[in-house]
Image (cartoon, helix red, strand yellow):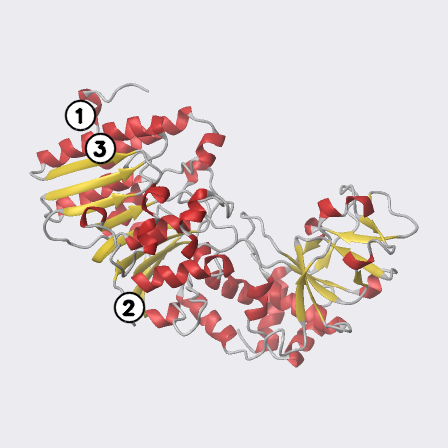
């Protein structure tokens, strides 16, 4: 890339425009693998300025941390916003591990300093090419102790668009942050936790991330630590999965979270705003709630709910009113026991004597099992002594996809599996499926159809999305999901038999619940 010349500086009206130009040029010369490996999904100017607008006023020298700076657009936006609010002295610390990009970032930060000087403000920038997590994870362990971060490692503002990809638990970064790690952590959670630990009292944390931190087992330890330090103040939910990072073809459910360092906080208000995407950020819908209405403070899970609209909140209240759960109805949920790579010797493409159906993710569609598809090589599995322990009896089940594609409109995809449709003693369920069953027996056909219909409805899909930011549908989340009474499920099952149209399913759910 060409050096940042005076003419380039002159053509860019402000630091954000400069950073966007430099970042776009860099992204154009690196391949998709490089962008993925480095989590290089650059924030659009509209998003950067919106995030910076959430930062409050701070006196004296304002210390700003951008832990994954990229081309510096969030640093630039923060400086712009602070200077226009009257800040005269700002110190920016920016981390970037991509050494080639860091060279371009250095030019941007120099441009930020020059722009600020013209506004009468003194801005100094410290660029660090170290790994942010490895350099600062000790801040998590020093909380409340003599080893808390020094003043030169604390900040008034932490603003970030962190990378997001899963880490192996043995990864040095995961090992360095064990207090917030469970299972296979996503790296963005480490950035959030460490960023919160480095905030000064009253400092602002503004992150744009996937929504998956809001619930689930993997992020439980993170939520306990994170929400013990910071109080949520604003949340912005994007309705479109594509829009926030459309230039990078990223499909992700994004949320912008603004929180304030407030150790031991108990209550307060939180503002929730929504927009379809970037284009309507200025016209976003806004409402204010008590924090306890969106963050379950009484639960060890600390699930953060993010209903996109007032209508979604109404739907959630309706579901929350149900007293039933799978366990109270005498049902259980398990993961399909056929792990494909461990059961290759039992799988068959042709079927025939001694085989039974093997159901995979792509066999399960809303309200129907499509088997066989013929396109799938191994749609059969041997039923014999060696494989019987990974098969399930041919009974009535509700079969669910454990993973939904990011572009799918529905997160919950469920189908009734009816034993009468298969003349076999056993059936194989691959590990990417969950199945709901009655231990020691079988669901009735009406129960299976009715429960599948509820799970496919907009009502439960909305509830699930607002309480769960993952594209993975875990068994633990379904166990915790409220369920209507069994007679209501059975009544729906009688009417929904053979119905696959989801609009019709929604209408039937409304009828049995007495909802318009």
* Residue 285 x/y as whole percent: 33, 59
Disc nearer the start of the sequence (1/3): 1
In space, the residues marked 1 and 3 are separated at their CA atoms by 15 Å
Q: Quadrant of the N terminus?
A: top left
The answer to whether one can see residue 231 in this image is: no
- Discs 2/3, front: 2
In the rendered image, residue 10, in percent from the top left (x then y), is placed at 17, 25
Q: Residue furthest top?
A: 2
In this picture, residue 185 sits left or right of residue 230: right
Residue drawn 63% across the image and 65% down it: 505
List the residue tagged with mark 1.
Answer: 10
Q: Which residue is mark 2?
A: 264
Query: Image quarter for residue 196?
Result: bottom left
- The residue under the point 19% across, 55% down is 56
Mark 1 surroundings within 10 Å by alpha-carbon count, few (fewer than 14), some (14 through 19), many (20 or more): few
- Is 422 drawn above or below residue 482 in the view shown? above
Q: First in sequence, mark 1 or 2: give its number.
A: 1
Q: Nearer the viewer, residue 345 or 248?
A: 345
Q: Which residue is mark 3?
A: 109
For the question of whether residue 485 can be seen, the reply is yes
Position of residue 7 measured from the top left corner of the image (x, y, whole percent): 19, 21
Say which residue appears at 36% left-offset and 27% top-offset.
Answer: 26
Q: CA distance from mark 2 to mark 3?
A: 36 Å
Task: Report the mark closest to the observer, 1 or 2.
Answer: 2
């Amino acid at each position: 890339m060409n050096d940042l010349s005076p003419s380039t500086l002159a053509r860019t009206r402000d630091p954000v425009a400069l950073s966007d130009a430099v970042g776009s040029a860099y992204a154009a010369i690196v391949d998709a693998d490089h962008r993925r490996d480095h989590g290089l999904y650059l924030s659009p100017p509209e998003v950067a300025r919106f995030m910076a607008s959430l930062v409050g006023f701070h006196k004296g020298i304002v210390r700003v941390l951008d832990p994954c700076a990229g081309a510096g657009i969030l640093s630039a936006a923060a400086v712009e916003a602070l200077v226009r609010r009257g800040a005269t002295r700002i110190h920016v610390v920016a981390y970037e591990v991509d050494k080639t990009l860091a060279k371009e970032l250095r030019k941007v930060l120099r441009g930020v300093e020059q722009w600020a000087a013209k506004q009468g403000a003194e801005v100094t920038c410290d660029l660090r090419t170290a790994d942010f997590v490895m350099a600062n994870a000790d801040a998590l362990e020093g909380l409340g102790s003599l080893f808390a971060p020094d003043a030169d490692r604390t900040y008034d503002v932490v603003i970030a668009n962190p990378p997001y990809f899963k880490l192996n638990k043995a990864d040095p970064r995961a090992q360095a942050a064990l207090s917030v790690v469970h299972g296979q952590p996503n790296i963005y959670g480490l950035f959030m936790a460490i960023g919160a630990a480095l905030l000064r009292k009253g400092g602002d944390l503004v992150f744009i991330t996937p929504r998956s931190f809001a619930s689930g087992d993997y992020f439980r330890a993170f939520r306990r630590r994170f929400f013990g330090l910071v109080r949520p103040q604003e949340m912005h939910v994007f309705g479109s999965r594509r829009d926030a990072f459309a230039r990078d073809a990223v499909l992700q459910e994004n949320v912008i979270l603004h929180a304030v360092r407030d150790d031991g906080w108990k209550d307060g208000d939180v503002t929730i705003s929504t927009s379809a995407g970037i284009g309507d950020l200025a016209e976003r819908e806004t409402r204010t709630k008590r924090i306890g209405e969106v963050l379950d403070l009484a639960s060890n899970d600390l699930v953060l709910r993010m209903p996109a609209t007032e209508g979604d909140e109404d739907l959630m209240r309706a579901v929350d009113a149900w007293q039933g759960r799978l366990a109270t109805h005498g049902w259980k949920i398990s993961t399909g026991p056929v792990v494909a790579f461990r059961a290759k010797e039992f799988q068959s493409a042709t079927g025939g004597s001694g085989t039974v159906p093997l159901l995979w993710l792509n066999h399960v569609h809303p309200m129907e099992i499509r088997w066989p598809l013929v396109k799938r090589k191994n749609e059969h599995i041997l039923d014999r002594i060696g494989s019987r322990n990974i098969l399930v009896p041919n009974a009535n089940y509700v079969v669910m996809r454990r993973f939904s594609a990011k572009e799918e409109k529905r997160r919950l995809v469920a189908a009734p599996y009816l034993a009468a449709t298969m003349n076999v003693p056993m059936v194989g369920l691959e590990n990417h499926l969950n199945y709901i069953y009655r231990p020691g027996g079988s669901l009735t056909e009406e129960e299976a159809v009715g429960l599948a219909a509820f799970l496919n409805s907009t009502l439960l899909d909305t509830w699930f999305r607002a309480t769960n930011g993952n594209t993975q549908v875990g068994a633990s989340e379904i166990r915790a999901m409220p369920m209507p009474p069994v007679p209501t499920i059975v009544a729906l099952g009688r009417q929904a038999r053979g119905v696959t149209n989801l609009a019709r399913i929604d209408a039937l759910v409304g009828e049995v619940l007495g909802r318009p």
